[in-house]
Image: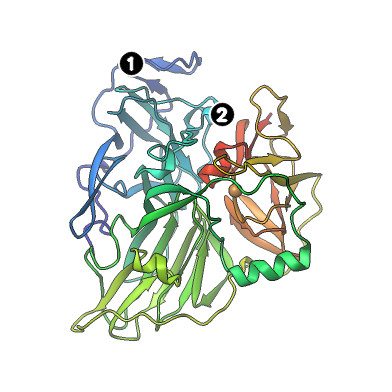
Amino acid sequence: MSESTESTRRGFLSAAAIASGVLCGSCNRSPNIGSRNVQQANPIGPADVTLRIGPVLADIAKEHTISTTGYNGSVPGPLIRLREGVPTTVDLFNDTDTPELVHWHGQIIPALLDGAAEEKSLQVPAHGHIRYHLTPQPSGARFVHTHVMSMADLSRGTYTGQFAFVYIAPKNNPGSFDQELFLATHEFEAFLGAEEMEEGDEEDRDTESKKKGVQPKQEKPNGWEIGYQRFTINGKCLGYGEPIRVKEGQRVLFHFLNASATENIQLAFPGHQFQVVALDGNPVPQPQLVDELELGTAERVSAIVDMKNPGVWVLGTPKDDDRNNGMGIVVEYANRGGSPRWVKPPKKRWNYTLFGQSRTVQTPEEIIPLVFGKINGGKGGFNRWTINGASFDETAPLKTLQKGRHYRLVLDNRTDDAHPIHLHRNSFELTKVYGTLTGGILKDVVLIKGFQQIEVDVTPAMDGLTLFHCHQQLHMDYGFKLLFNVV
Ligand SMILES: [Cu+2]
């Protein structure tokens, strides 16, 4: 197992969490939060989790070191293991010159701790520190990442190395496997380019566009898109890090995370199949074997692989250019040698409904249509993104949702791009995917292809401000977000 796939828990988590319900903030420069349940105090004793945000030099390939920002001096940051429902003390230190936001992606926690500026969450001041307590939930593969806006500055936000797996152990038996691996994909050395980066399968998209009709003709051409020089899994380009070492007959549980700022990816493991057991950390109703995974930005897939094809293999993206630039990792069976083999996977389309139940979900109490649009930015400009005709406006009146009420969000993508749509502080259930009814799949991000519709049901779990947005950093920064107020 490579250094970075190994869980780096030593000196990081204490055995027992402090069961204190009091939230305290402590910092060199105190955050301006004015909340009644926050008290200024000096931290007493070590926290259960400490994240230190700071500059990192990461060796991602042979004689290739990048300078970025990360957690605890590594990219990705260390695996954070928490226990469902067990209050946990968190220390956040910021060694950079700018305030940071640490977002606990996929957890149902108070807005104050969620780590989004729109939700008025606590910020970690530049060269400052905050401490608070959070109660992790629900169980499964989650993650932590920065939530700052990057805009045109590609050295900020999710373009950096500020991401780490969070695994919340369930209260009950987590299942049986011989080895558990956490693999996060991320691209580095981002640049602005004129060429439109295709999302998923170009052939598919062409047919879809023809079928569904093309985007309305716009006066301006498409604006900037993001490209990358280097592609990594757990911070290493293919062939540079230690291989994953397995033995014949082992059952290996992989947790994959797409920690990209902007890219949706596919992953395949030649000679093997993935048995998908959880999506975004939540067990699926119907685990299924597939040859290829697809993950929109911020999505997680947990899959078991039976190691029954001894050899040395490349697990990676089927896109040759991206794999050649690093998006892959070597899997080496014991007592096997030679060059790693790559074989193009059979072409089958990823489909969420494979893992769901074909059933009709109860009629919701309210249906909320959300139409996604794009206004081209033109050459040298940024595209703007709209929900129901408007880009995000912090002065606009908030849409109120009621806690415990059953809503259906009808996501209607009227653009030719795929969008990984994320709702904070909740899980939602997929109920209709591209015209097919489904049930039982709980997620916090759903990837919606160009000119398609997906319906998701949500019953808000906790009150407070709740952000809804596209997880593609460029889209989010340029208007693709909406703030709900749950009361
Ligand atoms: Cu988007």
Disc 1 target residue: 41
Residue occupying the point 35% across, 24% down: 130
Viewport quadrant of the C terminus = top right
Q: Dot 2: few (<14), some (14–19), or many (≥20) neighbours within 10 Å? A: many
Q: Name which quarter of the figure residue 401 lies in.
A: top right
- Residue kind at label 2, given as amino acid type: Glu
Residue under label 2, please give it: 119
Q: Nearer the viewer, mark 2 or mark 1?
A: 2
Q: Quadrant of the N terminus?
A: bottom left
| Residue 31 picture quarter | top left
Residue 477 horizontal/vertical position (percent) = 55, 37
Counting from the top left corner in percent of width and height, residue 339 is at: 24, 81
Residue at mark 2: C-beta within 8 A of ligand 1: no
Residue 352 falls left or right of residue 327:
right
Residue displayed at 32% across by 81% down: 341
The reply, left or right, for residue 4 in relation to residue 223 is left
Image location (x, y in percent) of residue 326: 33, 63
